[in-house]
Structures are given as C-alpha cells and as structure tokens.
Image (cartoon, rainbow, N blue to C red):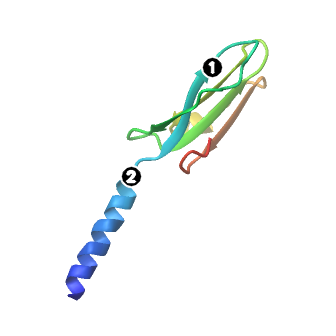
Amino acid sequence: MGSRTLVLILFLGALCVAQALKCNYCQKIEKNNPTCDKIEEKECTSGFDKCITIKMHSPAYGEVRRCANANECDAQVPPQVEKQCCNTDLCN
C-alpha cells in the first residue's frame, strides 16, 4: 500500500510540473485606443516561461501581452517603452 501511494504522489507531482504557463494574450497597436480591450488566455509553448506586458508610448502607441522567454525579459528597451515580466499564470 505504501509503494502505491508513493507512485501516485510522484505521478501527480509530474503532472503539476508538466503543466504549461498560461499568459494573457493581446496585441493592440492603435494611437486613439492603445490599451488591450479583448484579452485571451494562451498556454505558452516550450521555452516560453514568462508572461510579458509591453506598453508603447509616442510615437508608437500600443500594448502587447503574451508569452516570453528570459532573453526578452532581460533585454533593454527604449525609454518610450514600458516592459514588465512575471512567471505565474495570467500575471500579465
């Protein structure tokens, strides 16, 4: 009985680890209404372990929310761009 319990615990643990990150997704590039108003949930594919939100100000107005990788989150952005990364489901 004890070994069955251990196998079940290991199996459930593997399922939790294998579950992909979910991020909010939208892309809206529009000067008069630059904020995302239709946001979808997307499951990130392998290699994308962060969620990112990018807000662009003059001269390119817009907002992007999507899955990202660590390199994108570590990259420098110009002063007219705001960028935030996080690593929990739907944190962006």
Asked whether, in this view, residue 24 is left or right of residue 33, the answer is left
Asked whether, in this view, residue 34 is left or right of residue 47, the answer is right
Specify the label residue 19 is tagged with: 2
Asked whether disc 2 touches disc 1, contact meaning CB atoms under 8 Å apart, the reply is no
Q: Name the residue under label 1.
A: 28
| Residue type pointed to by label 2 | Gln
Asked whether, in this view, residue 91 is left or right of residue 32, the answer is left
Percent position of residue 51, x then y: 56, 40
State the residue at coordinates (28%, 67%). 11
Specify the label residue 11 is tagged with: none
- SS of the residue at dot 1? strand
**In this view of the protein, can residue 77 be seen by the observer?**
no
| Residue type pointed to by label 1 | Lys
Percent position of residue 31, x then y: 74, 12
State the residue at coordinates (72%, 19%). 34
- SS of the residue at dot 2? loop
* 54 in relation to 2, above or below: above
